DNA sequence: GTTTAATTTAAACATTTGTTTAATTTTGCA
DNA sequence: TGCAAAATTAAACAAATGTTTAAATTAAAC
């Protein structure tokens, strides 16, 4: 599956609109006018609106694959690996928020669960890497708590997505004046909070 | 704002459909046929589809108000308060998942940010209660870490919503065979994990 | 029991939807 | 240059959308 420049342009714009307004809330004419093309070009290039959504997932997901293995192979402590894992995780998601928003809203809606198997496979792969770090931590006696590793991605992605989806409200509460301040908060404080809580989960029994 | 039995029936069905298929993905005819009524009844009772969405939010939110004050007033330690707060929070959300799904998808979509102020007000109120518990914990010297309390709701709601929105995947990974097992996991293990991580955030510096 | 109001219905409405058609323009190549 | 393929266009298409209408039915009030 390779797309030409024109297709990629359409994919980029459709991705933004789908993330912002939802799949059903975005018409092909919306996309066409924003992309300065004729409506027919969408059918011409992708076959249908549904297949355009597929194209977005395929194209964007291939460029988003998490390289957690590189974190795993580093010569650092399990605790540091957790830190780096989370920082890397969030950095990746943050630079592809639109894609994740589409995945979490459209794919969730029971109508379109076609791509579920593929996504599920990636999730399982990522989980295996996290599990490896957790196992290592236990082996070294650093991690004390027996937890379900499966909840860690939920904590990272869930917390992060909720936070950015409520950007306006968070900026209000935390008195962040502009987008730069918000970005800075996410990349520093928010990441630290998530790191802290995941480590707290692994290290301490209360 | 009070609704008669017929209106409430429509509200209940529309809530389920909006949560499952999205607002734009659900037609008024969908709602009408599921509710065994004529399409015109929606306009007759609510004025429009948009106002039906409003009605859902108004009606369901009034019955969902978190009674965090009761937790705050209890004669227990701040740590226990955090536990109870989280357990209560999740219990409430879980019994109103559909409403929260609508809020987090539809309200997020930039088209409809009308009800934002009202929701924002409730969020701020809840946050104030959490802040009171955190302050108390610090005063007693139990909590050691200076954190932004504002991220706690993100952790609770975000983690929880992500988990239940990926129900299928989670059941697969955690080998939960049926809905009962899933519910049981959410109400026990998941709640405990979230409690543990929030407390870890407050108690320990790593 | 008659009258008035409230409810319910089927049909029609004007738009908007995704998609296709057929003609036109542009491009790539011999 | 000439020509075939690809790209682009405006228009039309049927189906689905939210909403309204006007008639029919039911309920309530007197």
Image (spheres, coloured by chain):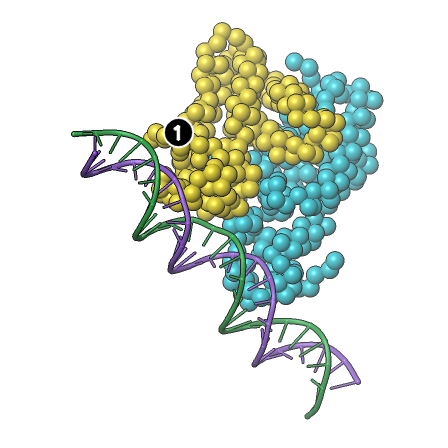
Chain colours: A cyan, B yellow, C purple, D green
Q: Nearer the viewer, residue A196 or A111?
A: A111
Q: What residue do we see at 73% from left, 31% from top?
A: B172
Q: What residue do we see at 65% from left, 39% from top?
A: A90
Horizontal side, residue D20 vs residue A205: left or right: left
Residue position marked by numbered label 1 in the rendering: B5
Whether residue B16 appears in this view of the structure is yes
Q: Nearer the viewer, residue A152 or B8?
A: B8
Q: Quadrant of the N terminus of chain B?
A: top left
Q: What residue do we see at 70% from left, 52% from top?
A: A58
Q: What residue do we see at 39% from left, 29% from top?
A: B5
Q: Quadrant of the C terminus of chain B?
A: top right
Query: What chain does mark 1 sit on?
Result: B
Whether residue A68 appears in this view of the structure is no
**Position of residue B96 measured from the top left corner of the image (x, y, whole percent):** 52, 28
**Position of residue A103 measured from the top left corner of the image (x, y, whole percent):** 63, 44
For mark 1, give the secondary structure: helix
**Position of residue B174 measured from the top left corner of the image (x, y, whole percent):** 73, 27
**Position of residue A18 measured from the top left corner of the image (x, y, whole percent):** 56, 50
């Amino acid at each position: 599956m390779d797309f030409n420049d024109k297709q990629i342009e359409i994919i980029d714009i459709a991705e933004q609109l789908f993330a912002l307004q939802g799949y059903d809330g975005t018409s092909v004419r919306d996309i066409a006018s924003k992309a300065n093309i004729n409506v027919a070009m969408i059918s011409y290039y992708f076959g249908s609106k549904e297949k355009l959504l597929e194209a977005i997932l395929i194209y964007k997901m291939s460029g988003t694959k998490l390289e957690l293995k590189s974190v795993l192979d580093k010569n650092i402590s399990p605790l540091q690996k957790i830190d780096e894992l989370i920082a890397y995780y969030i950095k990746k998601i943050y630079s592809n928020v639109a894609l994740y928003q589409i995945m979490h809203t459209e794919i969730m809606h029971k109508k379109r669960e076609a791509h579920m198997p593929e996504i599920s496979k990636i999730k399982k792969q990522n989980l295996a890497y996290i599990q490896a770090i957790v196992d290592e931590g236990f082996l070294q006696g650093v991690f004390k708590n027996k937890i379900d590793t499966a909840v860690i991605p939920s904590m990272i992605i869930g917390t992060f997505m909720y936070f950015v989806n409520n950007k306006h409200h968070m900026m209000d509460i935390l008195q962040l004046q502009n987008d730069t301040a918000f970005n800075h908060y996410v990349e520093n404080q928010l990441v630290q909070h998530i790191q802290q809580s995941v480590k707290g989960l692994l290290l301490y029994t209360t």
